[in-house]
Image (spheres, grey):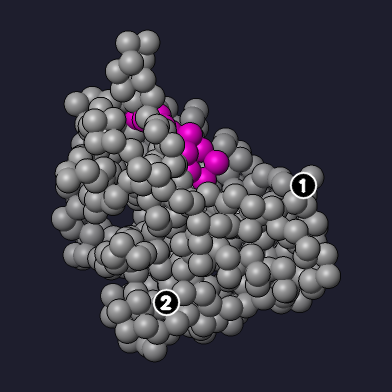
């Protein structure tokens, strides 16, 4: 799901911390991230099988002033995909399916099913249309029940993005289909299969699927924005909409139990897990991204669903776990990077609030317009009463604060927007800097 994020930039190096213990450094960093960089959620950090920090920061419910703690429950979005892919591995071990099976074995009614294998889907190499790119559906129907029949109807007339197996394109539709395959071969609901094969043996006692109807004191309220300028509540995406691509809710400790059980061979044998960790196109395996940092192998995945963001990182060489869950539309990447720097003795910075400067309205006026960052996703910039705002497709509008004459931020999460002029001095595009990525958006209006 696309989001338009705002940002605060870290500006001062952390010094005079050599006498601090590792937990103290982590605590200081996360306190600063909460105070100045907009982090709001729960974190668990572990190394060599020892939990160094497990704590909540900010509000579970901002309106009621209820603080987070280690038992706060969050939707985890696309982190769900590693559970789905692991179930596929389990069913293959039992001889109930093969990842080399053509999709036509299970759903022959889909026009392109004979071209696509289950493994193509797992690796996001199927070319299947991503249903979360449907702007009308995402704007108007995500809180409603999505039947399997309605899902197939939504994608049946959409052509493949490319020939299966030739390219990578992240597709929630593919993982939705894997959930339907799981139900077909087991004769059980997807949720029941995950509980039996994964949740129960991993002791994930606070995890589930139907967040809409969850009634527990630890349930977090999701926000599209959570800051001094005002809070914007997020709708709860129905579990049938996110399903096997993103419906799971959990806690940091349950996810620690999951990762521990998985990597200790309690869920699937080590030799099977090793195949899940083989990177294919775009370094993607079986519901995991596989890369490296500090010359160490990193297994990770992030998730984003309306009002919630999640991040799981595992460094197998040192049994490092960094698990972050937020109930704010927030880019966790910079905070995660700081935590890993602390753990590995690398330089890092304490976040400090960025101060805005005043810009004349005549200058701000030239930035007004609509910028296309991706098909179906634009950022509309408006000016009213001397205040510049930006609004992503399907998102609320947020005030843009000037860092320089051409660089702006919003006081929510870590991102920047640069406006770019052509040789005539006319604004022709914007560049969104977020999560280590630079996304250019051409001015179309």
344 left or right of 168 in image? right
Q: Nearer the viewer, residue 100 or 349?
A: 349
Residue 339 sits in quarter: bottom right
Residue 262 sits in quarter: bottom right
Image coordinates of residue 137 in percent, x first then y, are 19, 51
Q: Quadrant of the C terminus?
A: top left
- In the image, residue 134 lies in the stretch drawn in magenta: no
Count of numbered badges drawn on the protein: 2
226 left or right of 413 in image? left
Residue drawn where x is 29% and y is 66% of the image: 231
Which stretch is magenta?
Answer: 430-441
In this rendering, is residue 136 above or below 247? above
Residue 44 shows up from this direction: yes
Q: Mark 2 = which residue?
A: 59
Image coordinates of residue 218 in percent, x first then y, are 42, 84
Residue 384 sits in quarter: top left
Image coordinates of residue 148 in percent, x first then y, are 25, 58
Q: Residues within 10 Å of mark 2 (few under 14, many from 20)?
A: many
Q: Mark 1 = which residue?
A: 294
Residue 199 shows up from this direction: no
Q: Residues within 10 Å of mark 1 (few under 14, many from 20)?
A: few
284 left or right of 274 in image? left
Residue drawn where x is 39% and y is 89% of the image: 217
Image coordinates of residue 293 in percent, x first then y, are 72, 47
User: Alpha-carbon distance for marks 2 and 1?
Assistant: 33 Å
Residue furthest top in the image: 423
Residue drawn where x is 43% and y is 72% of the image: 74
In this rendering, is residue 31 above or below 381? below
For the residue labelled by badge 1, is the local secondary structure a helix, a strand or a loop?
loop
């Amino acid at each position: 799901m696309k989001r338009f994020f705002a940002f605060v930039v870290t500006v001062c190096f952390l010094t005079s911390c050599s006498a601090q213990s590792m937990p103290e450094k982590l605590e200081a960093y996360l306190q600063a991230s909460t105070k100045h960089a907009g982090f709001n959620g729960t974190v668990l950090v572990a190394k060599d099988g020892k939990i160094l920090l497990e704590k909540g920061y900010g509000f579970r419910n901002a309106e009621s002033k209820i603080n987070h703690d280690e038992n706060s429950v969050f939707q985890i979005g696309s982190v769900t995909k590693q559970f789905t892919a692991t179930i596929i591995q389990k069913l293959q071990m039992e001889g109930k399916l093969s990842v080399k099976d053509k999709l036509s074995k299970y759903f022959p009614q889909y026009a392109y099913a004979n071209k696509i294998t289950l493994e193509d889907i797992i690796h996001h190499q199927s070319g299947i249309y991503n249903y979360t790119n449907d702007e009308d559906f995402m704007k108007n129907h995500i809180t409603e029940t999505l039947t399997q029949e309605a899902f197939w109807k939504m994608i049946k007339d959409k052509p493949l993005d490319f020939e299966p197996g030739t390219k990578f394109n992240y597709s929630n539709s593919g993982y939705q289909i894997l959930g339907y395959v799981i139900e077909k071969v087991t004769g059980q609901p997807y949720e029941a299969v995950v509980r039996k094969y994964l949740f129960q043996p991993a002791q994930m006692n606070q995890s589930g699927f139907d967040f809409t109807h969850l009634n527990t004191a630890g349930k977090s309220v999701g926000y599209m924005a959570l800051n001094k300028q005002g809070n914007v509540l997020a709708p709860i995406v129905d579990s049938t909409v996110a399903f096997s691509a993103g419906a799971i809710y959990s806690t940091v400790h349950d996810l620690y139990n999951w990762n521990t059980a998985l990597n200790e061979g309690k869920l699937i044998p080590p030799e099977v897990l090793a195949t899940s960790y083989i990177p294919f196109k775009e370094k993607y395996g079986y519901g995991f991204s596989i890369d490296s940092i500090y010359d160490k192998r990193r297994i990770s995945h992030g998730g984003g669903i309306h009002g919630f963001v999640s991040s799981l990182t595992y460094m197998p060489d040192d049994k490092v776990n960094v698990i972050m869950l937020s109930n704010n539309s927030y880019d966790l990447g910079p905070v995660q990077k700081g935590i890993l720097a602390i753990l590995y003795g690398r330089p890092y910075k304490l976040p400090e609030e960025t101060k805005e400067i005043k810009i004349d309205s005549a200058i701000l006026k030239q930035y007004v317009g609509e910028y296309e960052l991706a098909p179906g996703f634009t950022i509309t910039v408006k000016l009213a009463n001397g205040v510049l705002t930006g609004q992503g497709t399907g998102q609320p509008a947020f005030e843009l604060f000037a860092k320089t004459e051409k660089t702006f931020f919003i006081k929510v999460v870590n991102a920047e927007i640069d406006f770019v002029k052509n040789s005539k001095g006319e604004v022709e595009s914007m560049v969104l800097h977020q999560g280590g990525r630079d996304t250019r958006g051409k001015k179309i209006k």
